Amino acid sequence: MLQVYIADRCPGSMVARRLAERLRERCPGVPLKLINVDDPGAAAPPEIFGTPIYAWNSRIIFLGNPSEDELMTHVRRLYESQAD
C-alpha cells in the first residue's frame, strides 16, 4: 500500500493530493491511503518528520514530491513485484 503523508499548511501537500488523484486514475488497482497528519487522531510513525512523504508498506520511498511519471513508474514496479 502506498501511504502519502500530508499536512494542511504544507504547500507541497497540495501537489501530493493531485499526484495521489492521478495515481488513482492511472493505476486504480494500487492501494493508496492519504494520511493528513493534522487530522485529530492521525497516527504517523516516528520516521514521518515532515510532509509530503510517500511510503510503500511503511518504507519511505520519496521525501517530497516526485514527478508524476517517476511516481507512477516506481509505484507500479513495487505493486507488480508484490504480486509475484
Image: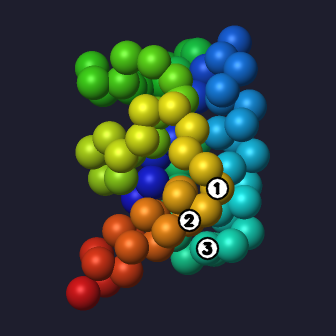
At horizontal 61% and vertical 50% (from top left) the residue drawn is: 67
Q: Are marks 2 and 1 in contact (CB under 8 Å)?
A: yes
Q: List the residue tagged with mark 2.
A: 72
Three-letter code, disc 3: Cys
Q: Are marks 2 and 3 in contact (CB under 8 Å)?
A: yes
Image quadrant assignment for residue 48: top left
Mark 3 / mark 1, whichever is N-terminal: 3
Q: Is residue 45 above or below residue 10?
A: below
- Which dot, 3 or 1, sits closer to the camera? 1
Three-letter code, disc 2: Met
Percent position (x, y) of residue 58? 30, 44
Image quadrant assignment for residue 62: top left
Q: Is residue 81 above or below residue 6?
A: below
What is the CA distance from the residue labelled 2 to the residue labelled 3? 8 Å
Badge 1 density bin: few <14, some 14–19, many ≥20, Cα 10 Å: some
Q: Is residue 5 visible?
A: no
- Viewport quadrant of the N terminus: bottom left
Q: Which mark is residue 27?
A: 3
In this rendering, position of residue 10 left or right of residue 64: right
Circle 2 sits in a helix, a strand or a loop, which is it? helix
Three-letter code, disc 1: Glu
Q: List the residue tagged with mark 1.
A: 68
